[in-house]
Amino acid sequence: MSGRLGRTVTGLVLGATLAACASGWSGDGSDARPPSPAAASTSPAPPPDPDGLTPDQRARVTAALAGLDRRAQVAQLFVVGVPLSDLAAGDQLAADGVGGLFLRGRSAAPATELAAATGRWTAGPLRPWVATDQEGGAVQALSGPGFRDLPPALDQGRLPAGELAALADGAGADLAAAGIDLDLAPVADVVPPGTAEGNAPIGAFDRQYGGSAEEVVTAAGAVVRGLGAHGVTATVKHFPGLGAVRGNTDHTAGVTDTTTTRDGPQVAAFGTLAGYAEHPFVMVSSATYALIDGSAPAVFSPVVVTDLLRHDLGFRGVVMTDDVGDAEAVQSVPPGDRAVRFLEAGGTLVLTVRASVYPEMLQAVLDRDAADPAFAATVDAAVQTALVAKARAGLLPAV
């Protein structure tokens, strides 16, 4: 089963600062002989893999896809919360084949203790993502022995380039040692100077790397590279940007951005970071963007996810939701519809920090998948994208 994939990543440049079968001869066996040197030199080169995978990685994707029934394929599209206060709760989710586990809350437990739990979850042949929120400052989920203290992003952005690179590299090493391979960081939202106090989700907590797109791309890009150096996939968030809103979508319904445009610098910053060689994920905001698509929150908007992120910015990688389990911004939508609408919009991974709504979400996708061939094709594309990302990260079994 194959899925429809988007274009090759293009990225965008932010000013002057910002800047992929051989048909060899074969006989019938009675007179087999190799091609002549001249013939070999003119044979066409193998076409590049559309996702930049090696032949081994592509074979792993094909084998994994063939080995999963439809329920197991759809389960790959969910990342489900596991309380850091109850790591055993992740055991059954991992055994059930969920696509990823998100370490929810805060913990001062040693990295070795977390590694014991993540080692259980990733012992099977098709490993789940193990994710956390390790930004720094007020948003640092893991702070026990084995995890260095990370300053707020605003302070990180003020560090000399070498110091920030070392800090990001160390954070990546810490997470990898604990068995964590997906960080829901860095924040790529641009908070204009002088507006931080009124920006509840980002600026009020110094989660922004700077007040301009150039500053954000430079600093957040260092974090993407530092995490990636240790096999930890970064997630740039919250597309198309929460830097110009007032309310926090975790606690407030109807949060609306009235200034961000499709061709604005905040959007361009995401395009640049999404094109990094480390293949970061992109997390979509649950706010509504009046000048892009005022009819729906970004997480449910084909205009935002497919037209802007996938078409205009050329991003073909993993697009994930912000939390759509507990967040107030989506509570008016039934849980199952949240998952269906996001996938319809062109997304890949549904994040719910509340595990209790996962079965309803999974079943809603399966029901719609069985009844609607067009939606089934959309699911095919999402599963393919999810498995390609796992192949890159080494989470798929050898063939």
Image: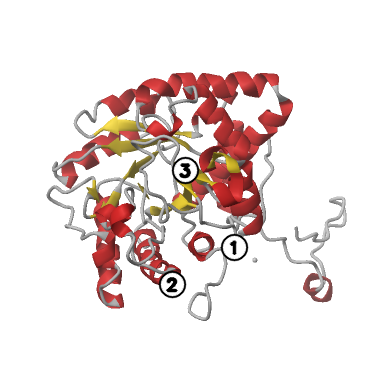
Identify which amino acid the numbered label 2 is placed on. Glu
Cα distance between the residues tagged 1 and 2: 15 Å
Given residues 287 and 310, the one toward you in this image is 287
Relative to 265, residue 302 above or below: above
Location of residue 15 with respect to 184 vertically, above or below:
below
Residue 28 in the image: state x and y as whole percent.
Answer: 87, 50
How far from the left and from the top, in percent, is residue 10?
Answer: 61, 64
Pointer 2 residue: 214
Which residue in the structure is indicated by mark 1? 263
Cα gap from disc 1 to disc 3, whole angstroms? 18 Å
In the rendering, at what x and y percent does residue 164 appear?
Answer: 28, 70
Residue 393 visible, this orientation: yes
Q: Is residue 316 visible?
A: no
Circle 3 residue = 287
Residue 62 location, quadrant: top right
The three-letter amino acid code for the residue at tag 3 is Ala
Q: Say which of 326 and 243 sits in front.
A: 243
Q: Nearer the viewer, residue 220 or 91?
A: 220
SS type, badge 3: loop
Distance between mark 3 and mark 2 Cα atoms: 23 Å
Q: Secondary structure at mark 1?
A: loop
